[in-house]
Amino acid sequence: MLKARNVWWILALVALVLFPLIETNPTYTTIGIFTLIFMGCATSWNMFSGYSGYINLGSAVSYGVGAYTMALLADHLHVPGNGDLFWLIPVGGLAAMIVAVPVGLVALRVRRHTFVVITIAIFFVFQLSAINFSFTGGTSGLQLPLIPWLETNYNKPFYYSALAITVFAALLSVAVRRSRFGLQLLAIRDDEDRAAGLGVKVFAVKLAGFTMSAFAVGMGGALYAVFLGQIYPQFVFDPIFDISIALMSIFGGLGTLTGPLLGALVLESTQQYLTIRFSNGSLYLIVFGALFLVIVLFMPQGIVVYLSDWRSRRAARRVEGARVVVGEAS
Amino acid sequence: MNGTAVLHSIIDGVLTGSVYALMATGLTLIFGVMNIINVAQGIFVILGAYLSYALSVHLGIDLFVGLAITIPTLFVVGIVVERVFLSRIKGPERVVMSILVTYAISLVIEGVLNIVFSANYVELHAWYVNRSVRVFGIYLPYIYLLGFALAVVLLGALYIMLYRTRFGASVRASLSDQTSAALVGINVRRVSTVCFGLGVAVTAAGGMIYGATNAFNASSSYDLISRLLVIIVLGGMGSIGGALVAGIMMITIEDLVSVVWGPVWSNLAFFLILVAVLSLRPQGLFGKPSVRVA
Amino acid sequence: MTTLLSVDRVSKAFGGLQALDECSLSVEKGSITGLIGPNGSGKTTLFNVITGYEKPDSGSVSFEGAEITRAGPSKVFALGVGRTFQITRIFARLTVLENMLVATQRDEGWLRGLTRSKSSKSELVSAMEWLDFVGIGRLASQPAGSLSFGQRKLLELAYVLVADPDVILLDEPAGGVNLTLINEIADKIQSLNKSGKSFLIVEHNMEFVMNLCDRVTVMHQGTDLVSGTPSEIRNDPLVLDAYLGGGDVYETEESS
């Protein structure tokens, strides 16, 4: 028998599958693609940072590596501008994982506060390298082969690829949460030293989690590169990306499954909307910053926890009310 | 490349590094006392620079005289931010939350500054900004020397405050252990608020010198904060002495790399040194090793 | 009797403070060994050195004849040395049962953890058995953070036991708990001892130590002062002196 919760998941998935068939306006399907990319990346980020409490503010490293791998491969392998490019997207994810190993070896040696700062520093190493080296095209970036598809159907393959990445990230996240490995990550979040004293090989577990979470983020970057056909170092290695991914997960609920999905869905679509609504970028910064402040200060556990608390409070009130009625009757 | 150029870059590095050391000291003080990583420190520096800019352009007030207004102003801004926002952060993920809250604050300030001053780059001007003095065949801009002097004076004042006053003793107690400090009757809340104010106030001075030596706009804050974070991590988070040494060291090395290999590599060297040092000493140069048990 | 755990002339300094100074100790197989001493005499530091949380400056630690001086906490645990903490440490945001499952496989490759589920049937059964043994089985699905102080102590004992260690180091098992619970904990220790487990117990409650332990080692200023049976210790003039004399003892703080 299907549980009620699973029904909601299936309905959500069906809605996401149907969306581009019903809504064909490219402006909106483009918003859909970006939202899905962020949903996948945030879910994958949360699988390590949310579970372990090691907040990675350099996730754009994986995103950028995925994007550059894509552009460089397409160039060197002379991949023609057609659907073949899509098969390279997992390679972008793999490249991000390979890069994550040495990054993790350095960054995970320190405790979580310093870890946050080191991930930021390592992020800048990558951004500046992309700007300074010549094989990355410097500040003018790299171009990918143009895909000569009709405008009306252009977005669909990208949309479904982004959806596939998101579904993959969500399934992986569930699998990890149910595995002993996931339990060990959660134990590290609560008390790393105690976990070590109970036989958890903390460094290996952290490194494995860090590396795994790079995969889907790298694929997100790779898809972004194919979709736009042009990448610039400051847009694929973007500090706003680092912070957005973290914010989306925290907004939704750090360490939960629904949190990052919902957080990215709400925030990325709002962000896209605000960008259109406030063509003035500065006003947009103020509104986004203020919104962000309110969320972090008033719902620090995220909307998922906030809403479920609210529901249980309401249910408790209802029970309380029923008791009063029963009390009066007797 | 020649000997003079290298010597020149070392002297430049020490002079400008002292200003970074001052700004980083504020940041590390805030972290040490409050367990808050204030990523808004970068935008506060820019805010300080714009305040000096407004005072000098619109009211004709000299940059250094203007500090008498901008330093107290940023002190108050710091107090307000701490009271209104940061004091609300609680729970196990305090450090992470503090990063997000201060980042959000910096986004709002960035937006406001962009609207008020536009995104065009500006520079601070005064007679001493573009003139140099020649010492042993090296031209040193007056502003570098004045900035160095200002940093030394303010760091000296901070030192006296920390080591010669009763309030300073409370701050140092809170730096080493907040719980114990509270147990011996120190009002940790008030110490935190004042420290945040002080940590932000030094950015007014740092911002003025930064604005006089660099063209800036609101987005320059990203470059600033990333450097400041590297400096405090390298020095050991919460170590004031570490921030001083790391600040001067990093900026000097950056200047040297810039002269020897070219300016594009200097930024990269900055972050690579951090990665290299932390691989060998995870607690930073002067940090205490993390306590592992209880 | 054979020696299970032995500490040989271990020294450890923190800055200027000599926390351990040529300290030696042994735990015989099947024994309950007590470790007592004034505050700051280095008992917790010794625990940290044995269990791999601190590396000693000199000296060695061995377990079942194999040297474990430089082994990390997870390795020491995997070999069969379990430990509780003075300030109870549990995983507050995991459920009580999940707390137990963290420890069930003490020697498993990390890669194996990726491919298996949180728990096998037999692990669940044994986790529940141990929870019932300490008497908190009914709380299995509660978040551990909601437990009372005493319940946390029991949980910590249970999740150390679930991995079936050969020797268990208890840091103040009777500290801060009520008399009923103290007796309950003493009973559990005794029944576990009968089934073959060895114990090394740090405790300030003298009655608890003297009634429970086969042998007692007294620590003073980072070194082992005397070792003997409880009655020998009770009558040793050196021990009285360490506790009552030497005013400087109370000025050196334990580094934990």
Image: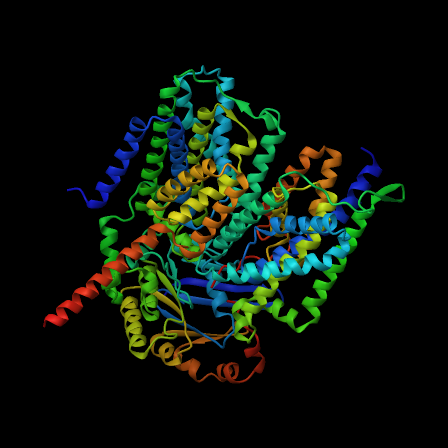
The relative height of residue B151 versus residue B12 in the rendered view (above or below) is: below
Q: Quadrant of the N terminus of chain A?
A: top left
Residue visible at 59% across and 24% down?
Answer: A135
- Relative side of B42 to A21, left or right: right
In the shown orientation, is residue A195 left or right of residue C189?
right
Q: Quadrant of the C terminus of chain A?
A: bottom left
Image position of B214 (left or right of B172): right
Q: Position of residue A143 (x, y in %)?
A: 52, 21
* Rendering coords of residue C183 (x, y %): 29, 76
Counting the numbered discs, the total is: 0
Horizontal arrangement in the rendering, residue B104 relative to residue C192 (left or right): right
Residue B31 in which image quadrant: bottom right
Say if residue C163 shows up in the picture. Answer: no
Quadrant of the rendered image containing residue B122: top right
| Front-most of residues B29 and C112 | B29
State the residue lying farthest toward the front: B58
Q: How is the image coloured?
A: rainbow
Coordinates of residue C59 in the picture (x, y in percent) = 54, 61
Position of residue C220 relative to residue A18, above or below, is below
Q: Position of residue A284 (x, y in %)?
A: 50, 42
| Figure check: C79 above or below A92 | below
- Asked if one can make out residue A144 in the rendered structure from this viewpoint, the answer is yes
Looking at the picture, tell me which residue is in the foreground, A267 or C228. Answer: A267
